Image (spheres, rainbow, N blue to C red):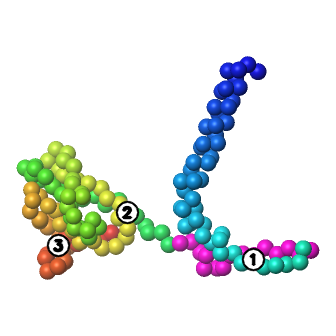
């Protein structure tokens, strides 16, 4: 083999080693969290001639509950508005964290939210207003707010 082929093979081997080893170091905590049942198996001393496979306890075998996420579009037709933001219990009522994008005369954003009910308000040019397209309302800190139920 010539020198160029050896260098290419060494470079490919180095890249392969990096691709395998770097993610394992970076995701070590996630691996421990999601596969913690592997560390809880009971170990017993048995005679060499008998082999026993111990299963993890039943409460570790069941899947961890995962929230069902839904895509929710917040949309508002306000052609003369200069800025529209969204504040609610899903972003700790911080409207500055969630500005809506303007497309023509419509402002909108899409969020992924777990199933449940959410209170929110639009902040249009600095003033908080109810969602004109949503008739459902409730109260938050003695203030009337819009109510969204994600199913």
In which quarter of the view is residue 144 placed?
Answer: bottom left
Among the two numbered marks 3 and 1 on one chain, the one whose residue lies closer to the N terminus:
1
Disc ID at residue 43? 1
Cα separation between marks 3 and 2: 21 Å
Foreground pick, 21 / 129: 21
Q: Mark 2, mark 1: which one is toward the viewer?
A: 1
Q: Residue beneath label 2, please?
A: 70
Among the two numbered marks 3 and 2 on one chain, the one whose residue lies closer to the N terminus:
2
User: Circle 3: is it few (<14), some (14-19), or many (20+) Cα within 10 Å?
Assistant: many
Among the two numbered marks 2 and 1 on one chain, the one whose residue lies closer to the N terminus:
1
- Residue 52 in magenta stretch: yes
Q: Mark 3, mark 1: which one is toward the viewer?
A: 1
Q: Do we see residue 75 in this rendering?
A: no
Q: Position of residue 22 (x, y in %)?
A: 57, 48
- Indicate left or right for 24 with 83 as reference: right
Which residue sits at x=26%, y=68%?
92
Q: Do we see residue 57 in this rendering?
A: yes
Foreground pick, 55 / 145: 55
Badge 1 marks a residue whose secondary structure is: loop
User: Circle 1: is it few (<14), some (14-19), or many (20+) Cα within 10 Å?
Assistant: few
Quarter that holds the C terminus:
bottom left
| Tag 2 and tag 1, C-beta contact below 8 Å | no
- Indicate left or right for 14 with 79 as reference: right
Which residues are the magenta region? 49-64
């Amino acid at each position: 083999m010539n020198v160029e082929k050896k260098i290419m093979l060494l470079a490919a081997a180095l890249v392969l080693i990096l691709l395998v080893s770097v993610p394992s170091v970076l995701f070590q905590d996630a691996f421990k969290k999601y596969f913690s049942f592997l560390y809880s198996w009971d170990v017993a001393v048995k005679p060499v001639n008998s082999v026993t496979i111990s299963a993890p306890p039943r409460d570790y075998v069941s899947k961890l509950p995962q929230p069902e996420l839904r895509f929710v579009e917040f949309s508002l037709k306000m052609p003369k508005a200069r800025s529209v933001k969204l504040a609610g219990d899903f972003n700790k009522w911080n409207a500055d964290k969630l500005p809506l994008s303007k497309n023509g005369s419509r402002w909108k954003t899409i969020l992924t939210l777990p199933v449940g009910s959410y209170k929110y308000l639009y902040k249009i040019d600095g003033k908080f207003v109810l969602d004109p397209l949503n008739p459902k309302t409730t109260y938050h800190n003695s203030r009337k707010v819009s109510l969204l139920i994600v199913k």
